[in-house]
Structures are given as structure tokens and as C-alpha cells.
Image: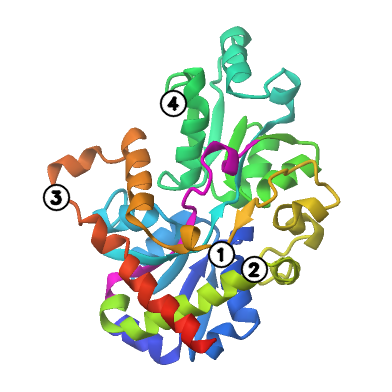
Amino acid sequence: MKSIIHSLQKSIRIGFVPLVDCAPIAVAYELGIFEKYDLRVELMREPGWATIRDKMAYGELEAAHAPAGMAFALSWGLGVLRKPCLTGFLLNSNGDAVTVSSGLHEEGVVDPSSLADYIKRSGREKPVTFGIPHLFSSHHFLLLQWLKPAGLRPGIDFQIMVLPPSLMASSLVASHVDGYCVGEPFNSIAARKGQGAILAESADISPLHPEKALIVSGEYESHYPEHHRRLIAALAEASDFCESTSGRKEAASILASSRYLGMDEDLIRTSLLPAQSSNPEFLSAESFHIFCDPGVNRPSSEKANWLVSHMRNAGLLASLNERAPTPLGTIVREDIYEDATSLVLAKG
């Protein structure tokens, strides 16, 4: 506990992975919204979700932008040191896509059925392999859901490889993977360079699915509940800002800086403002990212059950049969969301 007390005397350490959907955190930091809520924040840019997971587990972060499923993996000790964690705020919904290599696309692969046909006729020795950024992320669940109607089975008809988001596009070019399901901008990067084709968007696979969450340690919530609620209130205000056209333009400019993605601003706008992008054909959903809506930000039991159901279907919960897991209601905290968002209203 000494580490968290020492940290909060200086600032709260929030980890993030440089993706477009870290926009609310970046906006809250750069536009002074954290300061408005009397918060001192230190942003920690991390290369991938494994680093976020490990730093949360070992107390090197108090909070993180992370796949919502990671709160369960940490709390239940699945593939990581057991560390009680929770979420009182979901940062966004949708925002992912399935991309395949240009070579696979040229072979006629445009959907799961044509992929199944390709696998049957290709006779290739190396199995078709898809990249995902984390076993407990929505990308894993969305990919399995997308492929299931074609009868494609993981480990039999195709393989799954876990990669940091930033390595997806380069792994596609190097033929380490044949496709991937990941967040932006790594689908648009492959499409822009002619190295891959976007075949499906997550909004079409599972509309309004839970995506990233603000995950915090149980220690932080236990010892600093009022601080935690102000943190959520600040992010709720930033999320609302990110939902407007002007806010998305500002977010794209912020994310383009080296502190965050360090990429071309127009590329980032491809998914934030698809209708206004110079490459609108790459992503078609009118609301590819959704940052602010009670149905999106509220960490409800329905969203928790969606995540747990998909974890079970992916075979990730087998070890839980040996022990009683932490109840869902202690991991997904709708009561904290209610308390925190009332502070946004009070601030006006």
C-alpha cells in the first residue's frame, strides 16, 4: 500500500496503449479537464496490453485504459498474478475491425464463408493465422463470433497469435499473420498502404459491444474512493467532448502528437470522422467509435455477462471451476458510475 500512497502524493499513474480509443484520456490530460477536477495525473504510454496487465498486477499503475475483459483476468488471476481490480466507467464502444492481407483478399477472401472455402482448397501447410492484441480483449471474442457461422474453429481451422497492436500491420506484411482484429489506426494503416483489406467492422459484428474500460486497482478504490469518482467524472466530461465533430477534430490533433500515436492526423481522422476522411472507403460506419452514451459508458451487468459469456466460449474460464471467482458485482461497479457521473452534472 505504500506505493499507492506515495504515488498519489505526486499524481495518479494511468497507463494507456497508443490507440485512437485512448482519446478521452488524452483529451482530459491536454485540455486541463483532469486539473478541473483537482487531479494530478501521470500518463504512462505502454507498448501493449501485456505490459498494462503486468504493471497493474504489480502495483506500478493505479489505473489504466484497457480491454474491459482485463479487469476479470486480473481479479480472477487468469494468466497473471491475481490482483483485485474493477471498473466504474467504460471508455467507448465499437472501434475495432477485421483486416486480412492483400494476398488473401486477392485469393477471393471477402468474408468468413470465402475464407472457409480458401482454407479447404489452398492446401497450404502453414495454417491461416489471425492476430489479436489480448486473449481477454473484445477483439478475440469478435473474431471468433465473426468466423463461427462459417464453421471455422480456432486451433483446428485457423490459429490465433497474440501481438501488440503496433505490430499488427508489420506482422501482416511479414506474413507472420494472415489477418487480425484490432483497434484503430492499425486497420487503416494496412488499407492505406495497400497491404490489407478491411472486411468487417465491430459495430456490424456486435453493435455497442463493451470495448475499453478505465480499470483501477481495488486498493485505489478502497483508499481513495472520492479521488476515483473525480477521475471518472473528468473522463466522462472528456468522453462527451470527444463525441462532437469539433471534439473529434481536436482529439485527432492531440493523438497525432508524439506523446500519443505520433502519426499522421488525417490517418487518425479516418476512424474518428470517416465521412470527412480523405479515405472514407476504408471505414464505413457512421459512428465507428462511440465515446459517450449512457448505454456505452455504464458498466452494467448486461455488459459483464456479455464478456463472461464470450470468455467461457473462448475456453478462458476452465480454471475457474477449481475455485470460486470474485463476484461480478465487485468487478463491474455500476454504483460507482452513478456516483461519479453525478459529479459531472454538479460541475455543469
| Image-quadrant location for residue 215 | bottom left
Where is residue 157 shown, x and y percent of the image? 48, 19
Q: CA distance from mark 3 to mark 4?
A: 28 Å
Q: Residues within 10 Å of mark 1 (few under 14, many from 20)?
A: many
Residues in magenta, as a range: 200-219
Determine contact: label 3, label 1, CB under 8 Å.
no
| Image-quadrant location for residue 63 | bottom left
Residue 299 in view (yes/no): yes
Q: CA distance from mark 4 to mark 2?
A: 36 Å
Q: Is residue 124 left or right of residue 308?
A: right
Q: CA distance from mark 2 to mark 1?
A: 8 Å
Secondary structure category for the residue under label 2: helix
In the rendered image, which residue does mark 1 sit on?
292
Determine contact: label 3, label 2, CB under 8 Å.
no
What's the mark number on residue 324?
Answer: 3
> Where is 168 relative to 347, above or below?
above
In the rendered image, which residue does mark 2 sit on?
242
Secondary structure category for the residue under label 3: loop
Q: CA distance from mark 3 to mark 2?
A: 39 Å
Amino acid type of the residue that numbered disc 1 sits on in the rendered structure: Cys
Instruction: Check residue 6 for magenta coloring.
Output: no
